[in-house]
Image (cartoon, rainbow, N blue to C red):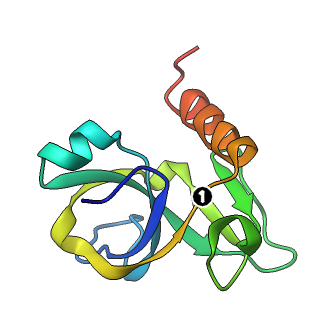
């Protein structure tokens, strides 16, 4: 079973239009009840961050020290999607354990979905 806050490489192909594609890391954001009982999970894909890149209001830049990924990365909330767990590549690529970072991610989700 995957768990909320874990990071896996995910195969997002096939994609259409401006959807993120390819195999890339993604953060599990669905709750553990969903993750335990359904063969799907909700993920937010990452994109690698390069110095000088724009970080848009629907994104959050995370240092590799907070994710366990090799590079600093951008979480792209505008690309959130629910996927089959068969798209997840093993083993787990990282995990977000820092409570402050988790709160930032929760706040980004609240803002993205306008849940105030």
Task: Give the side of residue 53 with respect to residue 28, left or right.
Answer: right
For the N terminus, give its image quadrant. bottom left
Task: Give the side of residue 84 with respect to residue 50, left or right.
Answer: left
Give the image quarter of residue 92.
Answer: bottom left
- Residue 77 vs 8, above or below: the answer is above
| Residue name at image x 69 percent, y 43 percent | 99
Task: Give the side of residue 43 with respect to residue 107, left or right.
Answer: left
Q: Residue furthest top?
A: 116
Which residue is the site of mark 1?
96
Residue toward you, 49 or 99: 99
Task: Give the side of residue 104 with respect to residue 24, left or right.
Answer: right
| Residue name at image x 72 percent, y 74 percent | 64
Residue toward you, 11 or 30: 30
x then y, percent, for residue 71: 69, 82
- Residue 52 vs 23, above or below: the answer is above
For the C terminus, give its image quadrant. top right
x then y, percent, for residue 102: 64, 44
Label 1: few (<14), some or many (≥20) within 10 Å? many
x then y, percent, for residue 10: 34, 74
Task: Give the number of marks.
Answer: 1
Give the image quarter of residue 100.
Answer: top right
Residue toward you, 90 or 79: 90
| Residue name at image x 62 percent, y 38 percent | 108
Residue toward you, 71 or 81: 71
Secondary structure under the numbered disc 1 in the rendered image: loop
x then y, percent, for residue 80: 42, 51
| Residue name at image x 78 percent, y 80 percent | 50
């Amino acid at each position: 079973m995957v768990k909320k806050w874990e990071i896996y490489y995910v195969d997002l192909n096939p994609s259409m239009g401006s959807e993120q594609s390819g195999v890339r890391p993604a953060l599990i954001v669905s709750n553990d009840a969903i993750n335990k009982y359904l063969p799907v999970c909700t993920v937010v894909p990452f994109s690698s961050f390069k110095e000088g890149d724009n970080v848009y209001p629907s994104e959050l830049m995370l240092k590799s020290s907070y994710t366990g990924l090799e590079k600093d990365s951008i979480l792209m909330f505008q690309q959130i999607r629910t996927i089959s767990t068969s798209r997840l590549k093993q083993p787990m690529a990282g995990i977000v354990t820092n409570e402050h970072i988790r709160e930032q991610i929760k706040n980004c989700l609240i803002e993205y979905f306008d849940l105030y």
